[in-house]
Amino acid sequence: MIRQLAISLCIWSVAVPSATAWQADPSIEPSPAETVMRWTGPEAGDALYQLSAAIASADTHGLDPWDYNLLQLAFISPDIANPAADRIATSAYLDLANDLLRGRIPAGSAVRWPFEPRERDLNAWLAGALESGDIAASLDALAPRHADYQALRQALARYQAMDPTGLADPIGTGEALGLGDVGPRVAVLRARLDALGYLEVSEAGTEEGSPPDIFDETLEAALKQAQRDAHLEADGVAGAETIAWLETPIARRIAELRINLERWRWLPDDLGAHHIRVNLPDYRLGVFENDRQIESHDVIIGRPSRASPVLTATLTHIIANPWWETPHSLAVRDELPLFRRDPNAVNRLGFQVIDRATGTVVDASQIDWHAVSASDFPYRLRQAPGPLNALGRVKLIFPNPHNTYLHDTPARALFDRSARAFSSGCVRVHEPVDLAIWGAQAGAGLPAETFQAAIDSGRETRIDLDRPIQVHFLYFTAIADGADTVRFVPDIYGHDAAVLAALTAPRSSGAESGAPTSGMAVEATMGECPVRL
């Protein structure tokens, strides 16, 4: 609708006599530091029309066309040279170019986001666009090239055009719906899953020809897939939590797509030829070589009170059979209460107790843990390698301000859970030896059998890497998952609201200059890991 209105206004403004077209005050001159290109006058061609059409299409990127002088541009006569109008058009182009390149809001102003913004000389970029005569292509070329960004754009277009017919009726409250149930609520559930792309339904009913109000195996399978996508318990039963998820309004999904398109605009073009990408809300880690994902691992992330941070760092070394140097805060919060309940846990779990003052190992059997002060804890704790070691068999180190890393865990049953926010900030990896073998091969050329021998030795072994492998902890709640498929996952740390508020706020000099918006930063909890579960 916005694109049609804007294009119509542009066509109208070109067609009407120039005397009726809006004229900017020619006395308004640009500041000396601002470069103004020529959009008006006999030699300008159709550049102004192209600009208006490109701005009207900004909503395909999740941006608001009205942020870019759209209405003013529609009433400028392109045939009459007008420096002030040129300035308005130049400003509109540069604003949209900046937002496609770096994001509508500066990275880090709404949530902590440690990536450096992408850079271009936008004045030179604009000059080249006017010379080539292709304004729209020059703007599109500034948007992220990542396949996931393009997939989210396609999903946004689908949701903006989505037929609400199958989503109009609420499933309603009542008993949970499951296999064998019959009734109108089942028919509404079926229509909703169909509208969301989980189920193809003919007019006669399901593929097997059963009536739409019967909860059959086809409906159960579709519901389980929807639950898996949302990290809900995939039991095939439509309970209150599942129904609430399915009834999320289309407008909310569109907002989520806009939020996550913005996050992609905050990322660099190149994430590294070899890199590890952890999407925290999706509980998933991907291994990438030359932009192609070659491995995927389920992960456990920090609980909301000890959130895993968004970060970017370089993997420097991998440790097989690591000792766990227990952070002081975790020794006080987690281990001291355990030792008070069960003093034998010190030896059973393989801990060394070291006197902080002398650096000597203390006989734990001689310690009265109830008499030990939590506020003035006098010991340092180390856990030896072994089957109960909190880090498991491997850890991958990438120095960062949060002291966060990737590691194994002895609590592997937790990977069976759909939602996996249990740690103290570090990220636990399912099948971590496979990940470590890849890292040792890609980063140090170490053969798989050599690394496996280090694991089998039971001794702590460090492998230093001499080839760069980037590690990125990201935060995406709308996820491209194959062709024409997008999944929405819960906003586990509650970051989306701050991004949406900043994304929909009026443009301000602070936001445009890249200055953080006061009061909008969301601190990530310092990672300390692991926590015992």
Image: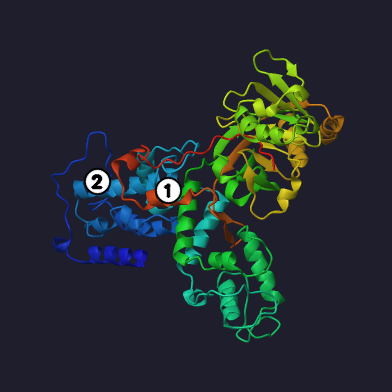
Residue 23 locus on image (x, y percent)? 16, 55
In the image, what residue type sits under mark 2? Arg
Q: Say which quarter of the image contains residue 56.
A: bottom left
Q: Say which quarter of the image contains residue 360.
A: top right
Which residue is labeled 2 in the image?
A: 87
Which residue is labeled 1 in the image?
A: 498
> Nearest the camera: 246 or 386?
386
Residue drawn at x 69%, y 54% as measured from the top left: 417
Q: CA distance from mark 2 to mark 1?
A: 32 Å
In the image, what residue type sits under mark 1? Ala
**Is residue 326 in view?**
no
> Nearest the camera: 167 or 95?
167
Residue drawn at x 75%, y 38% as measured from the top left: 438
Q: Earlier in the sequence, mark 2 or mark 1?
A: 2
Is disc 1 placed on a helix, strand or loop? helix
Residue 460 locus on image (x, y percent)? 79, 26
